[in-house]
Amino acid sequence: MLDPAPRRRRRVSRAGWTVLFFALVLGLDQATKHWILHGYDLPGRQSVALMPGLNFTMVWNHAITFGMLGGVGTAGRIIFSVVALGIVALLGVWAARTPHPWVAGALGAIMGGAVGNVIDRLQFGAVVDFVHLHAYGWSWPVFNLADAAIDCGVAVLIIDNLFDRDRG
């Protein structure tokens, strides 16, 4: 017999996308860093070529993006952590107000990456970076999954801003 009441697909709310991407990025970031440090023992190996153009290279990043503001000393870990958590709070407000699920997901990814790096700063005094891309004499700064999620989230926000013509 047919069910007389039509089934409604459950839709994920904007807050759900934010929480999902936040948890996914934070969990994967911390799991990969734990594996790099304790399972793979990259600190003992320093750098391992995985394939042409891709190495795992151990870097303890005491600064912020691309090594900027690295000269602030030991206070940097607290200053950078407080600033990052303040930004995460502001992004949370933005995520709660956005009408677009992809923006909510992007904000969640940025927030998860930022919190992942804050955890490193508070636990180790520096961020664990290990992905090293290079080719033909060029080398990209060593990064981690949190950094990649932040960059991808920002790219989504930029694309959304460029193509959302509904704004005044």
Image (cartoon, rainbow, N blue to C red):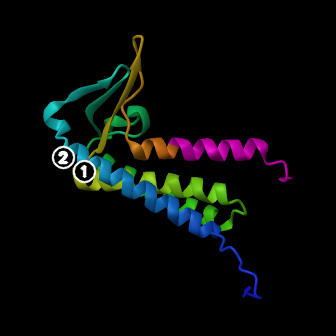
Residue drawn at 74 percent across, 85 percent down = 2
| Residue 166 counted in the magenta span | yes
The image shows residue 87, relative to residue 131, as above or below, that is: below
Q: Quadrant of the N terminus?
A: bottom right
On the question of residue 89 being in view, the answer is yes
| Residue designated by label 2 | 39
Image coords of residue 22 (percent x, y): 48, 60
The secondary structure type at the circle numbered 2 is: helix
Residue drawn at 68 percent across, 66 percent down = 97
Residue 86 is left or right of residue 116, and the answer is: right
| Residue designated by label 1 | 34
Residue count near mark 1 (Cα–Cα under 10 Å), binned few <14, some 14–19, many ≥20: some
On the question of residue 74 being in view, the answer is no
Image coords of residue 14 (percent x, y): 64, 66
Image coords of residue 24 (percent x, y): 45, 58
Residue drawn at 29 percent across, 47 percent down = 33
Which region is colored magenta?
151-168
Tell me, for residue 143, which label it has, or none. none
The image shows residue 122, relative to residue 43, as above or below, that is: below
Mark before the other along the chain sequence, 2 or 1: 1
Image coords of residue 16 (percent x, y): 57, 69
Q: Amino acid at mark 2?
A: Gly
Residue 103 is left or right of residue 75, and the answer is: right
Measure the alpha-carbon separation of dots 2 and 1. 7 Å
The image shows residue 30, relative to residue 70, as above or below, that is: below
Dot 2 and dot 1 residues touching (CB under 8 Å): yes
Q: Amino acid at mark 1?
A: His
User: In terms of image quadrants, where is residue 91?
Assistant: bottom right
Q: Give the dominant element type of the magenta stretch: helix, strand or loop.
A: helix
